[in-house]
Amino acid sequence: MASGKFEKLQIIAFSDPGCENQVGEPFVAMMNPENYVQEIKMEFENGQGQGTSGTQPKFKLKPPEELSFEILFDNTGIINDRDNPNPKYQAKEDISQDIEEFKEFLMGYEGEIHQPKFFKFVWGTSLMKGICQSLHITYKLFNPDGKPIRAICKVSIRELKEEERRVAEERNASPDLTHYRTVKAGDTLPLMCYRIYGHSKYYIQVAKVNKLTNFRHLEPGREIFFPPVDKQTK
């Protein structure tokens, strides 16, 4: 249930991909964006043999998700500053300094980690952890002397996932992939084959590949290689 509290979009910087070690103060938007766009894509191989009328696309990969939104910078006086207690948005001659600080915040190189910072984007809830992939700045209004007083910054974020979460979501247990598994107490080769291939009958094939002479008694801690198998021909 909504709390009724007015929340501002925040961008929080971190020095690690897990977003645990915060760097500096969060950036708080002057105004919340009107919308944001979440892009989710899949890539497929489109190879087709000569003389064929078509082929079934073969899954290639799922790129990281992307999030994009626009941030307004304004010093025209139209927006009531009392609604924005952040001192960044108090009356200034122009917005040039604010824009430069925003660019450095998102895209600046951090010597200690040898790359730009990692970010968490929060608007009521955590929207995404990621890195800033691009920043497009459109200057909209100017003072008579040419100094900008309004700009819209389009921010594009590329998602980051912790390795454990990525592996859990992918659930790569396909029989046509290569697998390595560490033997645990109680494991047998037929049982491990069943978990990976969906059938225990491949245990002799796996035993030969791993040069196992006594596959009925596996030593806990040993790593076993499970090669890809063609289930249609076995």
Image (cartoon, helix red, strand yellow):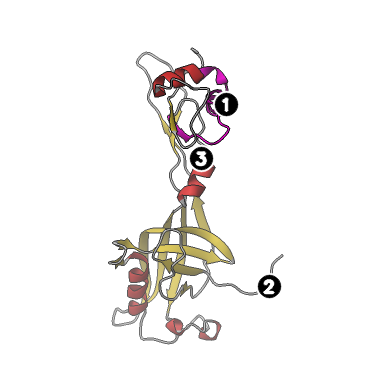
Marks 2 and 3, the one that precedes in the sequence: 2
Asked whether the viewer can see residue 40, the reply is no
Front-most of residues 62 and 164: 164
Q: Which residues are magenta?
A: 178-202
In this figure, which residue is indicated by the disc labeled 1?
191
In the rendered structure, are the residues bearing label 1 and label 2 in contact, judged by CB atoms less than 8 Å apart? Answer: no
In this figure, which residue is indicated by the disc labeled 2?
4
Q: Residues within 10 Å of mark 1 (few under 14, many from 20)?
A: some
Q: Residues within 10 Å of mark 2 (few under 14, many from 20)?
A: few
In this figure, which residue is indicated by the disc labeled 3?
170
Quarter in which the N terminus is drawn? bottom right
What separation in Å lies between label 1 and label 2 (alpha carbons)? 54 Å
Front-most of residues 137 and 219: 219
Could you say where residue 110 lies in the image, as x and y percent from the top left? 30, 67
When the figure is inspected, residue 96 is found, relative to residue 132, above or below; the finding is below
Residue at 48% across / 73% down in the picture? 29
Mark toward the viewer: 1 or 2: 1
Could you say where residue 167 lies in the image, as x and y percent from the top left? 49, 43
Mark toward the viewer: 1 or 3: 1
What separation in Å lies between label 1 and label 3 (alpha carbons)? 22 Å
Task: Name the image quarter holding residue 72.
Answer: bottom left
In the rendered structure, are the residues bearing label 2 and label 3 in contact, judged by CB atoms less than 8 Å apart? Answer: no
Q: Which mark is residue 105?
A: none
Callout 2, which amino acid?
Gly
